[in-house]
Amino acid sequence: MNKITILTISQGFSFLKRFYLWFREYIKNHFFHYRGPSAVLESLIRGFGILNIDYQLNPEIKDISDIVCVISGVDALKWAIKAKKQGQIKKIIAGPNIVITPEDAGGILLDEAIDLIIVPSQWVKDFYASFKSGFDEKIKVWAAGVEICPESNEKRKGCLVYKKDVDEKLFSSIIKYLKSKNIDYEIIKYGRYKKEKYFRMLNKIKFMVYLQEVESQGIALLEAWMRNIPALVWNQGHFEYKKVAKKVFGNISAPYLTKECGMFFKDFNDFEEKLPIFLDGINQFKSREYVINNFSDEVVAKNYLKIIKEL
């Protein structure tokens, strides 16, 4: 296979602007908690390194190869589309972190110059496919991975409540219930922590309660499962994108949750019923094994290469 070019920044920008954009992302990723696009890119690069795959990240225009993978960045994708139409490159693979819906950014994902669109889970593929007849034939599902970390020897106790987008009444009810059952807990809020802090907390707890309306993949969950932390995940089973008046259905808050790594609950009454069952069987979960087998950096990099080879 020829060298793979990964783009996240438009090659039409000047060197100074490209450097500024790179530095801005570096600051975000290292001093704040902006995990999505950066975690996906980092996983793929780590996987390519393990497999000794020849790739380049945001190279000079003269060095760009025939296959261009735009992992993120609308401007990067605009440049790639223009370059392909001018005969500078041959293939464009777009995603998974470009836009929220295919109609965003002027419907850029619908451009015929794009050979393949990558999305992080099946429900996202179904959602994208609903925008255009036959669009699903152009879409492949690929999930990013996480690093294999050492197992913690620390004594584990209590619960980590991961708060993202959740109804405040439900959140308050869950906290009150944990207190009533004398279950130790800590709260972590999305966007307000560095990953190192999150990992330290994961090494000390026995389980997680994950509160988020919708996840395209759920990197934070994979990181918990890698550390053998099963999760009780809130899932209403549906979500509406009001901007485009479309609903999505299914396990949308944790598309990769299986019986090896946790359970779902749909509301507070269901939480009250599920938590005792969850805790009674907590030693039966095998979340670390599940993630190592399906979401290690090496495994997901192989999956990505397979998609490219099928083009």
Image (tube, helix red, strand yellow):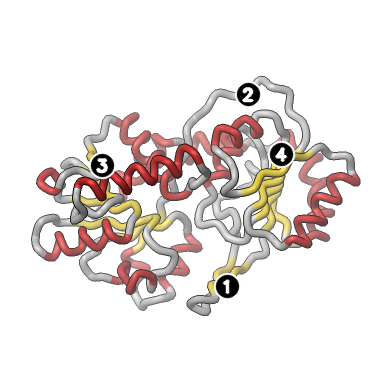
Residue depicted at 26% across the width and 48% down the height: 18
Closer to the camera, 171 or 52? Answer: 171
- Disc 4 residue type? Phe
In the rendered image, which residue does mark 4 sit on? 207
In the rendering, which numbered label is found on residue 152?
A: 2
Residue depicted at 82% across the width and 56% down the height: 173
- On the rendered structure, is 54 left or right of 39? left
- On the rendered structure, is 6 left or right of 126? left
Q: Tag 4's secondary structure?
A: strand
Q: Nearer the viewer, mark 2 or mark 3?
A: 3
Query: Quick check: can you spot residue 208?
Result: yes
Residue 300 spot, x, y in % from top left: 40, 41
For residue 141, which quarter of the picture?
A: bottom left
Q: Tag 1's secondary structure?
A: strand
Q: Tag 2's secondary structure?
A: loop
Residue 134 spot, x, y in % from top left: 34, 74
Residue 231 spot, x, y in % from top left: 67, 44
Between discs 2 and 3, the one toward the N terminus: 3
Quadrant location, the C terminus: bottom left
In the rendered image, which residue does mark 1 sit on? 240
- Disc 1 residue type? Glu
Q: CA distance from mark 1 to mark 3?
A: 35 Å
